[in-house]
Image (cartoon, rainbow, N blue to C red):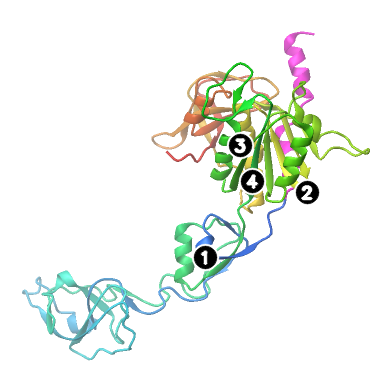
């Protein structure tokens, strides 16, 4: 059998990525909802539809600084009509804190600040710059349209308006809408608490260079940042040696404060792959708490998923190579976080893009390759694969997208159309 045939036979034994993701995500449920104060709700996902209890604006008010008047009294003002100005008596001043109801009489007006309640019978506000800015009496040089400068109660949001549906992220603007319509609490899905653990006797912490037999732990720092970017409350617990009892004890302790645990390293079948050996071990005739699966994914075919502890906290086990760990996070851990948070959809948005360079890909594996995606003039997108392939950290650091090449693709020619996942990196 040729090397190519051997590779194809091995790929046929792998679990398709779509099947694997479906089997994992079906085991997860969104976290129970919480009633949160509005100031704490930002970044969470609504668990219920939100309806406006009160109108916005709550009362008729001025939208500009000027003079509130009756349109009939000023309709003849304008320099175009022979330069004639309209003169009105200013009978009072109204600010945003004014609360006593007042009424206009013919030939009069009120000086008003933006946000001030309108006098009864006022149907126009003349901007200050269209007048002589008089205090006891004012001359008006231009006539605005009827209703100019006026915001009627409920103009923007009548009471009973559906403000946001369940599954919507709470943004700063949405917080403002909720507050303006009288909402002080909302029911949301809490941000998942995600604990990140790096495993391996070879690992040393950051702040030094690697030596033979030592590898700087980049993964736990990177994955903690990735979990935070995905909206989680992320905690890095540091490095765990390849000690069976130490790993079991650490995971058991973390179940008390975690909604999801992410481990990195030890997912393979080599002599030093302790995580797989410990978490998949059969005890008392029962399978281990975590199942490790060879997935048709490049880079990093070996992924683990299961639950640990009495609370059955989900655990995702990612490879130890930093590039494969970050790709594995995007493919598996990030959708799990989104699902726990109640977000929809759980996957990143994708686009079809025009490939600028011919690339090759291993047959039988779905490859995720760092790339730069850009919008084309006239519409559509282009995608440029970044040098070094999917394992390079520098490529991942520069990427704003992940080029996706399917299991049946061995070569994608320049000019072909490919799928690209869009990364929401903040530049």
Q: Nearer the viewer, mark 1 or mark 4?
A: 4
Q: CA distance from mark 3 to mark 1?
A: 30 Å
Which structural element holds mark 4? strand
In the rendered structure, which disc, 4 or 2, sits on the residue that comes first in sequence?
Answer: 4
In the drawing, what numbered circle is on residue 312?
A: 2
Q: Which residue is mark 1?
A: 38
The answer to whether residue 239 is left or right of residue 75 is right
Above or below residue 143? Residue 371 is above
* Residue reaching furthest to the top: 2
Q: Nearer the viewer, mark 3 or mark 4?
A: 4
Query: Could you say where residue 210 lies in the image, as x and y percent from the top left?
Result: 56, 21
In the rendered structure, which disc, 2 or 1, sits on the residue that comes first in sequence?
Answer: 1
Crowding at dot 3, Cα within 10 Å, few <14 / some 14-19 / many 20+, comes out as many
What quarter of the picture does the C terminus occupy? top left
Visible residue check, residue 293: no
Mark 2 in CB contact with mark 1 (< 8 angstroms): no
| Prevailing SS of the magenta stretch | helix
The answer to whether residue 167 is left or right of residue 39 is right
* Magenta segment boundaries in residue numbering: 1-28
């Amino acid at each position: 059998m040729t090397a190519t045939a051997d590779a194809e036979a091995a790929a046929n034994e792998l679990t398709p990525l779509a099947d694997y993701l479906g089997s994992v995500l079906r085991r997860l449920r969104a976290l129970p909802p919480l009633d949160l104060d509005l100031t704490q709700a930002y970044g969470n996902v609504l668990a219920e539809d939100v309806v406006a209890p009160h109108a916005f604006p709550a009362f008729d008010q001025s939208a500009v600084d000027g003079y509130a008047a009756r349109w009939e009294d000023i309709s003849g003002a304008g320099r175009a009509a022979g330069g004639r100005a309209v003169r009105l008596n200013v009978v009072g001043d109204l600010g945003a804190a004014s609360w006593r109801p007042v009424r206009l009489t013919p030939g009069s007006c009120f000086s008003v600040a933006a946000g001030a309640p309108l006098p009864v019978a006022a149907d126009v506000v003349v901007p200050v710059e269209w007048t002589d800015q008089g205090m006891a009496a004012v001359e008006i040089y231009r006539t605005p349209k009827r209703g100019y400068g006026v915001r009627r109660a409920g103009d923007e949001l009548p009471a009973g308006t559906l403000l946001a549906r369940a599954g919507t992220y709470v943004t700063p603007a949405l917080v403002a809408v909720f507050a303006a319509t009288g909402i002080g609490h909302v029911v949301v899905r809490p941000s998942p608490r995600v604990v990140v653990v790096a495993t391996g006797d070879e690992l040393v912490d950051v702040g030094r260079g690697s030596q033979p037999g030592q590898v700087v732990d980049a993964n736990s720092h990177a994955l903690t940042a990735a979990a935070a970017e995905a909206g989680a409350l992320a905690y890095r617990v540091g490095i765990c040696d390849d000690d069976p009892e130490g790993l079991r004890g650490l995971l058991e302790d973390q179940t008390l404060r975690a909604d999801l645990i992410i481990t990195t390293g030890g997912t393979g079948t080599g002599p030093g792959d302790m995580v797989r050996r410990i978490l998949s071990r059969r005890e008392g005739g029962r399978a281990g708490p975590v199942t490790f699966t060879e997935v048709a994914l490049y880079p990093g075919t070996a992924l683990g998923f299961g639950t640990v502890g009495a609370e059955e906290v989900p655990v995702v086990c990612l490879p130890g190579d930093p590039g494969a760990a970050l790709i594995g996070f995007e493919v598996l851990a990030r959708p799990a976080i989104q699902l726990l948070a109640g977000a929809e959809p759980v996957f990143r948005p994708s686009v079809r893009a025009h490939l600028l360079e011919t690339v090759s890909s291993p047959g039988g594996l779905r490859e995720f390759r760092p790339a730069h995606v850009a919008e084309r003039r006239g519409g559509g997108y282009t995608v440029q694969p970044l040098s070094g392939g999917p394992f390079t950290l520098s490529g991942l650091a520069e990427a704003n997208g992940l080029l996706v090449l399917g299991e049946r693709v061995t070569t994608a020619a320049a000019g072909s159309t490919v799928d690209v996942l869009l990364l929401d990196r903040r530049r």
